[in-house]
């Protein structure tokens, strides 16, 4: 169950999809998600890996 992650959030490495245009972006060591480079949207959905500061189910 993925929640949108706002740009600027601290995230783990993984793949994120823009909730507006569907653009996917892989995040490596970057800690802060940038706005979407395609449309400027500031909301991302975690596709694989990664997580958000709002993750309700931490593994630890
Ligand atoms: Zn976009």
Image (spheres, rainbow, N blue to C red):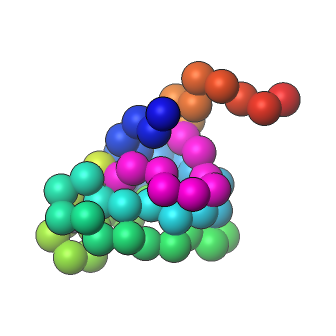
Rendered-image quadrant of the C terminus = top right
What residue span does the magenta drawing correspond to? 44-52
Please state if 40 lies on the left or on the right of 25 as rendered: left
Residue 59 in the image: state x and y as whole percent. Answer: 78, 32
User: Main SS type for the magenta part?
Assistant: strand
Residue drawn at 38 percent across, 70 percent down: 24
Can I make out residue 43 in this image?
A: yes
Q: Residue at x 55, y 69 (%)?
A: 27
Residue 3: x %, y % from top left: 41, 36
| Residue 30 visible to an observer of this rendering | no
Above-or-below relation of 58 to 24:
above
Quadrant in the picture for residue 18: bottom left
Q: Given the current orientation, which residue lies at the most extreme right position?
A: 60
**The furthest residue to the top:** 56
Residue drawn at (48%, 56%), measured in percent from left and top? 47
Residue situated furthest front in the rendering: 1
Q: 18 left or right of 1?
A: left
Quarter of the image where one finds residue 34: bottom left
Instruction: Say if 24 sits above or below 60 in the image.
Output: below
Determine if the magenta segment contains residue 51.
yes
Q: How many marks?
A: 0
Q: Is residue 34 left or right of residue 55?
A: left
**18 or 36, nearer to the observer:** 18
Does 16 sit above or below residue 55? below
Rendering coords of residue 58 (x, y %):
71, 29
- Magenta span has 19? no
Above or below, 4 against 38 in this view is: above
- Which corner quadrant of the image does residue 25 belong to? bottom left
């Amino acid at each position: 169950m993925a929640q949108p992650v706002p740009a600027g959030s601290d995230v783990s490495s993984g793949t994120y999809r823009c909730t507006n245009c569907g653009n996917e972006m892989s995040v490596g060591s970057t800690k802060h998600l940038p706005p979407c480079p395609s449309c400027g949207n500031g909301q991302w959905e975690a596709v694989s890996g990664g997580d958000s500061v709002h993750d309700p189910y931490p593994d630890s």
